[in-house]
């Protein structure tokens, strides 16, 4: 699958200690150019655990948002913009949906913040 920025995909996302991985949704944040020139894509993790305290680099997508259906997610989810991973595009299991432009602007801003690039 050719990754596209803003796509919500299902991938075997690794735990941060790299001892395990579990299928989970993620958002493609790498640029279209990067995705075309590389076999890899850069992703941020999604979590349905909205009760956990939020980091200042987290972004919540609520199930009652007007365009939630377009995300392909089943539950409200937290975009964990500080949990980035680079993985081969062949590991993308399926595309679930897409983030709208406003959400992607917020997500990319929070990724920039998480990396201290602002």
Image (tube, helix red, strand yellow):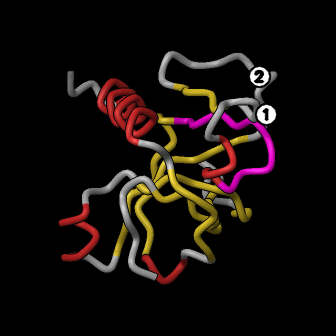
Residue 49's tag is: 1
Image spot of residue 8 (x, y percent): 55, 57
In the picture, the quarter occupied by the C terminus is: top left
Asked if labels 1 and 2 touch by Cβ distance under 8 angstroms, the answer is yes
Q: Residue at x 45, y 35 (%)?
A: 103
Q: Locate residue 36 relative to residue 45 in the image: left or right.
A: left
Res 52 label: 2
Which residue is painted at 47% across and 34% down in the image? 82
Instruction: Please state if 1 lies on the left or on the right of 33 as rendered.
Output: right
Q: Is residue 117 left or right of residue 101?
A: left
Rendered residue at 23%/76% (across/down):
36
* Above or below: residue 82 compared with residue 55: below
| Classed neighbour count for the residue bearing mark 1: other residues with Cα under 10 Å, few (<14), some (14–19), many (≥20) | few
Q: Secondary structure at mark 2?
A: loop
Q: Which residues are magenta?
A: 72-80
- The residue at 66%/41% (across/down) is 68
Residue 44 position, x and y percent, is: 49, 48
Q: Nearer the viewer, residue 20 or 109?
A: 109
Q: Residue 105: horizontal and vertical position, in percent?
A: 34, 33
* Residue 8 counted in the magenta span: no
Q: Residues within 10 Å of mark 2 (few under 14, many from 20)?
A: few
Q: Residue 86's x, y, as percent?
A: 41, 61
Horizontal side of 5 relative to 45 (left or right) equals left
Q: Secondary structure at mark 1?
A: loop
């Amino acid at each position: 699958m050719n990754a596209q920025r803003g796509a919500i995909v299902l991938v075997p996302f690794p735990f941060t200690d790299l001892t395990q991985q579990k299928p989970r949704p993620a958002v493609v944040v790498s640029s279209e150019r990067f995705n075309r020139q590389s076999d890899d894509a850069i992703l941020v993790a999604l979590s349905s655990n909205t009760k956990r305290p939020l980091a200042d680099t987290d972004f919540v997508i609520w199930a009652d948002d007007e365009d939630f259906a377009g995300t392909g997610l089943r539950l409200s989810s937290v975009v964990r913009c500080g949990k980035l991973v680079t993985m081969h595009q062949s590991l993308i299991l399926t595309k679930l949906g897409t983030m709208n432009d406003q959400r992607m602007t917020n997500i990319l801003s929070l990724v920039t913040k998480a990396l201290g690039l602002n």
